[in-house]
Structure formats: structure tokens, C-alpha cells
Amino acid sequence: QVRLVESGGGLVQTGGSLRLSCAASGRFYRINVMGWYRQAPGKYRELVAVITSSGGTNYGDSVKGRFTISRDNGKNTAYLQMNSLKLEDTAVYYCNAEATLRNSEDFNSWGQGTQVTVSS
């Protein structure tokens, strides 16, 4: 119903920057919330940042002041600008979307994940 395609992951040195993108497509009426979560080996998946359709944002404590989430509602795309990257930011980053389908049902979707590796 909602397909998410992520891009922009890769390898970067500590202190560097990366920008992730997540494009949503499918048979939906509206994407209400888009967000990024991450999971490092041996750890639970955790919130990175979320953004509502009106631009309200929420960030995980570990990324506040370094990461910025934004979205282009016309393109159904969310972005995550990651600056001042640290070794502990290494993880698989997953895009998530909460959508309202054309039949008015709510639908939650996950992307396939993109690897972000920060090296010293």
C-alpha cells in the first residue's frame, strides 16, 4: 500500500555528514508522519527523528542538535541531514511512514533500511 525507498547511506569519517532520503509511493491519501529509526548490532531499534505533515518534529536525545529532519509533502519525501557524525551513529537506518489510505484506513510502513557506517 505504501512503498518506501531509502537512499543516501554509506561510509563517512567521524565529524562528517550524510543526507538520507526516503520517498513514499503507493495508493494512499496522505502521509501523516514520516520518520527515521536506527538499529545497531545487538541493540533495539530506536527513534532518530520524526516529522508530521505540518512540520512538527521530534528527535531522539542522542541526535538532537546534530541531525535535522525535513520533508517535501509534494514529493512525499523525507530527508535526514546528519552532521557531526559519531562512531555510535553507525547503524542501519530505517524509514517509517504512517499513512491514511484511500479507504480511510491507517497504514504503517517500513523501508528496507540503509547502512550508515562512521569510521575513525
Image: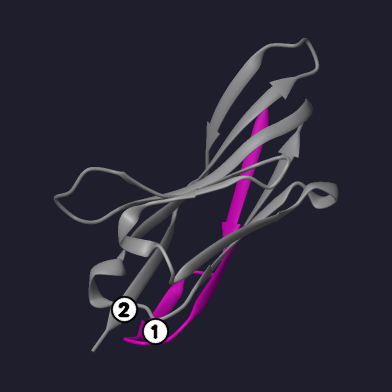
Tell me if 90 is positioned left or right of 50 in this view: left
Residue placed at 36% from the left, 87% from the top? 15
In percent of width and height, residue 93 lies at: 41, 56
Q: Nearer the viewer, residue 86 or 65?
A: 65
- On the question of residue 86 being in view, the answer is yes
Q: Amino acid at mark 1?
A: Val
Q: Is residue 19 magenta?
A: yes
SS category of the residue bearing label 2: strand
Against 1, is 77 above or below?
below
The quarter of the displayed image where residue 28 is located: top right
- Magenta stretch, main secondary structure class: strand
- On the question of residue 27 being in view, the answer is no
Furthest toward the left, the residue is: 42
SS category of the residue bearing label 1: strand
- Magenta span: 1-21
Mark with earlier residue (2, 1): 1
Q: Nearer the viewer, residue 16 or 58?
A: 58
- Residue assigned mark 2: 118
- Residue assigned mark 1: 12
Against 88, is 26 above or below?
above
In percent of width and height, residue 34 lies at: 60, 42
Furthest toward the right, the residue is: 74
Tell me if 19 is positioned left or right of 13 in this view: right
Mark number displayed over residue 92: none
Q: Amino acid at mark 2?
A: Val
Badge 2 density bin: few <14, some 14–19, many ≥20, Cα 10 Å: many
Q: How is the image coloured?
A: one colour
Q: Where is the N terminus found, in terms of image quarters?
A: top right
